[in-house]
Amino acid sequence: MQTLPIPHVDPLPLPGPVWLFTALLLVVFTLHVAAMNSALGGALWTLWNYLRGRHAKHPHSRRLANELAHLLPTFLAFTVTLGVAALLFVQVLFGNFLYTSSILIGALWLAVIPLVMVAYYGFYYFSYTAERGKGIAGCVLAVSVCVLLGIAFIFVNNMTLMLSPGRWLAMYRAHPNGWNLNLGDHSVIPRYLHHINGAVALFSSLLTFLGMRKMKTSAEYGRWLVQRAALVFAACTGLQFLLGMWLLLAIPREIAMVLLRDPLSGAVFGLSLVSVISAMLLILLGSLAEKPGPLVYAGFGMSLVTLFLMVCMRYLLRLAYLKPYANLGALAVRPQIGVIVIFLLLFVGGLATVGYMLWLVARGARARVSAMAPY
Amino acid sequence: MLIALVAVLHVFVSHFAVGGGFFLVVTEGLARRQNDAALLSYCRRHSMFFALLTLVFGAISGVGIWFTIGLVSPEATSTLIHTFVWAWAIEWVFFFVEIAAAIIYAKSWDSLPARDHMIIGWIYFVAAWMSLFVINGILTFMLTPGRWLETQNFWDGMFNPTFLPSLVARTAVSFILAGIFGYITLPSGEERERVARWAAMWMMGGALVLPLSLWWYFSRIPLFSQLYMNGVLTGVRHAVRGGVGFTLLALAIALVCGIWKPRWMRPPVVALLVVCGLGMIGAGEYLREFVRKPWVINQVVYANDVRAAQVQELQQKGVRQTANFLLSEDSEGLAYGKNLFQLQCGSCHAESGYRGMRRRAEGWDAAFAADILQHINVLRGTMPPYAGDERDRKALGLYLASLNSAWKFNVTDANRLEIGEKVFASRCGHCHTVNGNFRPLRGAFEKATPSQVQEVFPALGAISSNMPEFNAPDDQAQALAFYISHEANLPITHTAAPADMPTGSNHSRLLLPVEPRQEVR
C-alpha cells in the first residue's frame, strides 16, 4: 500500500516528450495569465474609472472606461481559450494530482463554469451600456469583478491543493462531497493576493503601452493614461515584492530550500528580479520623459518577460512540491511524431490566420480613417 | 447526470456554432450579391446573437465538459488525454481561430469592406467545422476504438469505424440547428417571409441527410450497442421515439410555419422549435451515451471508471487494498459498504433519485445482495463486472440491504399473487420475465404447480453459475412460487409480450446473451 493516496500514473505512455509538453505548458500558460490579467486587471481599472468618470471633471476616466468596456469581453474570451490549452497540457503531465485535487474541491471547481458565464455576460452587458453611464451598468461590472475574484480564489485553492497529497485524505474524510477549500495551507492567501495584485500590475503596464498609442491621436489623454498607469504599475510592483516575500515565507521551509538550492530556479528568480526592477524603472522614467516611447515600450516588454519568468518560477515551485511524489523523467514516452508535426504546422498556420484577420481589421481601420480625412 | 446536462446543452449550442456560422456567411453572401439591405441587416443582428450565445455559453460549457469529465471519470479522461492530447491541441488551434474570427466577424460589419468581412466569415466556418471534425474522432473512439485496441496507433483511434457517419450526422444536425436558431432573430416587415423560408430550407437540407447518416452510424456500432436499440429498454425506447418525434415536429413546423405560412412563425412557435431542437439533441446524446454501456471507453474503461485491466486485481485484493480514498479504516461494516457504493457505483447510481438503488434493492437482504453482485454483469448488459473481493461484496451487500427495511408480509389467499409479484420483481425480475422476452421462465415452469416450482428454489445456485442462491423466507418463497406458476400457466397473448417488467425498472428487459459479448469493431 502507498503511504499517501496518490492515484497511479496512467499506464499509457506519454504521446510526446516531457520537454515539449513543458514548453507548451509554459508558453500557453503565460499567454493565459496575460489574458487573465487583462480581463481581471482591466475590469478593476474599468470599474474604478467608470465610477470616477461619472463626475464631469474626470473626462479622461470616463473615456478610458468606455474604451476598456469594449475590450473586456475579448480579454475574457482569450483567457478562457488560452486556459483550455493550459489545462490540456497540465493534465498530461500532472493529471493524477490535478484530478484528485479537483475532485476534493469538486463542488466549487464546477461552480467556476457558471461563474465564468455570469462574469462574461456581465462584461457584455457593461460593454453595451457603459457609454450611457446610467442604470445598473456599474453594479453589473462590480458583480463581474467579484465573480472573477472568486474564480481566481477557487483556482488558487485547487492549484495549491494538487501540490499537497499529504492533505488529501483528511480533507476527503471531512467533506467527501467536494465542499472543500485549501485554506489550511498558509500559502493560499499570499499566493492569491500575489496573483490579483500582479494582474493589476501587468494590466497597468499594458495600459502604458496603449497610452503611447493614444498619444498619437490624442496627446493629452494619452499622456494622462501613461502617467496614471505607470504610477499604478510602480505601486503594485512595490506591493508585489512584499506579497512575494510573504508567499516565500508561507511555503513549507523544506520546499523553499529545494527551490533556493536549485541553480536553475535561483537563476530564474534572479533574472525575474532584474527584469521586474528594470520594467518598473523604465516605465516610471518613460512616463516622465519628454518622449516616453522607447522607455515605455521597453518597460512593457520587460514586464512581459517578468511574467514569463514568474510562470517558470511557479512551475519550478510545483516541481519542488511534487519532488517526493512525481518523477516526470521516469514517465514512459512514445511520441506521436506525425501528429506533433501536424499540430505544430497548424499552430503556426492558426497564428498566421489570426494575424491575417487582424491585418484585415487594421487595413479596414486605416481605410476608414483616410476616407474620413477630407472632412 | 451532470455530464448529460452539461453535454446536451453544450452540444446544442456548439452544433449551432458550426451550422450557424455557415448559415451566416452564406446568407451574407446572398444579401450582398442581391444588394438586399434588409437581409444584410438581419445577418448583422443574427451575428450579434450568434456571438453572444456561442462565444459565451457555447465556449464555456465546452470547458465545463472538461471540468466535469475530469471529476466524474478521471481514469477515462486520462486515457483519452494520453491518446489524443495532440488531437485536442489541434482542435484547440481551430477553437482559437474560431473565437478570434467570431469576435471580429460580429464587430466589424461597419469597419471592414464586404469582401474582407466575408473572408472572416469563411475562416470562422472552416475553423468551427474543423474543430467538430477533430472532436468527432475522439467522441466516436469511445464507442468504436476499432483497430486502436491492437495497435494503440493514434490514427487508428481517430479515424475509427464510426468517424465518418458520425461526422456527416453531426454536420446535418448543425444545419438543422442553424435553421432553428435562424428564427430567433427573425426580422419583421417584408424580409420576414424570405428569412423564414430560407431558414426552413436549411432545416430540410439537414433533415434529408440525417436519417441516412444515422442509419450508417448505427450499422457500424458494436453488436452489444445495436442490441440496445431493439426496443426492449424503456429508456432507449423513449429516447428513440422522443428523438424522432421532436425532429419530425420541428420539420413539420418548418414546412408549415416556415415555408407555407411564414407569418405564423411567431415567438411561441419559435420557442417550440427550440425545444424540439433541444429534444432532438438530448435524445441523440442520451442514445449515444447509453449504447456504450457498460463502457465509457469500449473495452478499456468501464462506466464506473474502473479500467478493464484493473478488475482482476481488484477482485483478488479487494478495494481496501487498492483504493486511495476510503472514508474510514473500517473495511467490513456498513460505512465501508457505503464508501464502496460511492466509489464504484456513484458515477451511475444515486442512493435514491437518479437510477436510485433504494428502489432497485427493495426486498433484498444482505446475503442476497452480496450474492447478486457477483453476477452484476450478466444481470444486465448495462452493468460492468463487480470489481472487488468477497469481503467487499459483503460490505456493499450490507449497505444495499440497509437502504430498505426488511419485508414482512402477512400472506393470505387474497394477496398471495400480489406479494408473489413483488418478490419476483425483487429476486428474479432483474434477470427474468415469466412470459416476456427477457430470459423468460415460461418454458421451465409451464404446467408446473406452485409446489413444483418451489421445489426448484433450493437448487437455483447450482443450476447456473450465474444464478444467486435463493434464500427468501418461506412465506415469500410460497408466494413467489404461486405467482410464477400462475403466470406461466396463463394463455399466451401476443400483445402481452414483451410485457412490462414488474420491477418498474427501466432496464430489466434487455435481451442479451449470458455468454461473453461478441464485439464488433
Image (cartoon, coloured by chain):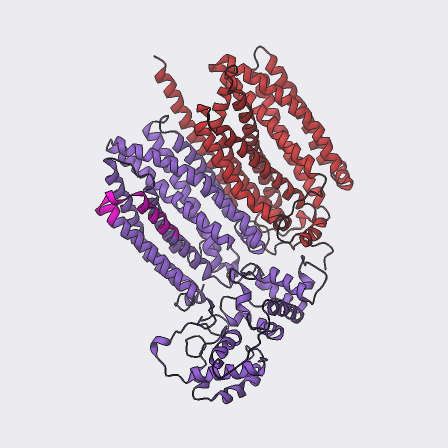
Chain colours: A red, B purple
Q: Position of residue B273 (x, y in %)?
A: 33, 48
Quadrant hosting residue B214: bottom left
- The C terminus of chain A lies in quadrant: top left
Q: Give, as a single range, the part of the protein colored magenta.
A: B256-278
Q: Position of residue B361 (x, y in %)?
A: 55, 69
Above or below, comparing residue B59 to residue A237 in the picture: below
Q: Main secondary structure of the magenta part?
A: helix
Residue in the foreground of this view, choosing between A284 and A221: A221
User: Does the magenta portion include B212?
Assistant: no
- The N terminus of chain A lies in quadrant: bottom right
User: Does the magenta portion include B260?
Assistant: yes
Residue in the foreground of this view, choosing between B414 and B79: B414
Q: Is residue B84 left or right of residue A325?
A: left
Q: Is residue B453 left or right of residue B113?
A: right
Q: Is any atom of residue A338 visible in this view?
A: no
Q: How many marks?
A: 0
* Residue at the extreme left of the image, as rendered: B260
Please name the residue shown 58% across and 79% down the image: B472
